Structures are given as C-alpha cells and as structure tokens.
Amino acid sequence: MVKPVIYTTPTCQFCKMAKAFFQEKGVAYEEKDVVSDLQARQEMVDKSGQLGVPVITIGDNVIVGFDRHALEHLLEEK
C-alpha cells in the first residue's frame, strides 16, 4: 500500500482527526507540517490548488479536509 501523506498545521483539529483515523486503522502515514516546511506547503498547493488543511494524498488521490468515508474507500482499494 502507498503510504498516505498528510499536509498539516499544528493547530488544525481536522488534521488531528485524520491522524487519529489512520492510527485507529493501523495505517502508517507521513506528516508534513506546512507551517514550518515551505517546500511541503508548495507541494500541497500544487496538488490541491489551495492552502486549507488537511490535504491528504494516497497515491494519485487528493482529499481536502477530513473525509472519513472517502479515506475508508481509498484504503479498501489499496
């Protein structure tokens, strides 16, 4: 399975919910803090077209915000 990448900020509650979701499912993920990492911020904008977080990528799929249903669907496919 492709490791999900979560673009986050330290104070984002939806980011925390997304990380908790992956932990509950036992899915390893990579976190990129877009406040302290300007390269990660630019990656996120390039992929999603906006600055809102979280942005979650799984392979070529991009999810803006915490969408439990969409994440579960993508995890089932992988």
Image (cartoon, helix red, strand yellow):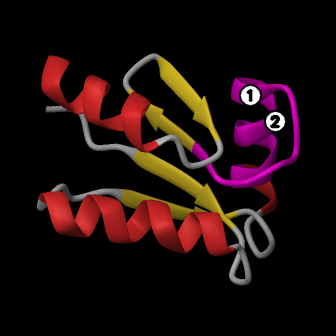
Residue 7 sits in quarter: bottom right
Find the magenta span and give its range: 40-55
**Category of crowding for the residue at label 2, using alpha-carbon neighbours closer than 10 angstroms: few (below 14), some (14–19), many (at least 20):** some
Is residue 44 in the magenta section? yes
Q: Is residue 6 left or right of residue 65?
A: left
Residue at the image point whose x is 84% and y is 26% from the top: 49
Tell me the distance, in whole angstroms, between the alpha carbons under discs 2 and 1.
5 Å
Q: Amino acid at mark 2?
A: Val
* In-front residue for pair 65/43: 65
For residue 54, above or below residue 31: above
Residue 65 colored magenta?
A: no
Quarter in which the N terminus is drawn: top left
Q: Position of residue 50 (x, y in %)?
A: 87, 35
Q: Is residue 52 above or below residue 24?
A: above
- In the image, residue 37 lies at what x, y percent? 73, 66
Q: Residue at x 71, y 38 (%)?
A: 43
User: Which element is circle 1 on?
Assistant: helix
Residue 48 numbered tag: 1
Q: List x then y, in percent, for residue 54.
A: 65, 53
Q: Residue at x 71, y 73 (%)?
A: 12
- Residue furthest to the right in view is 50
* Residue at image mark 2: 45
Q: Position of residue 44 (x, y in %)?
A: 72, 40
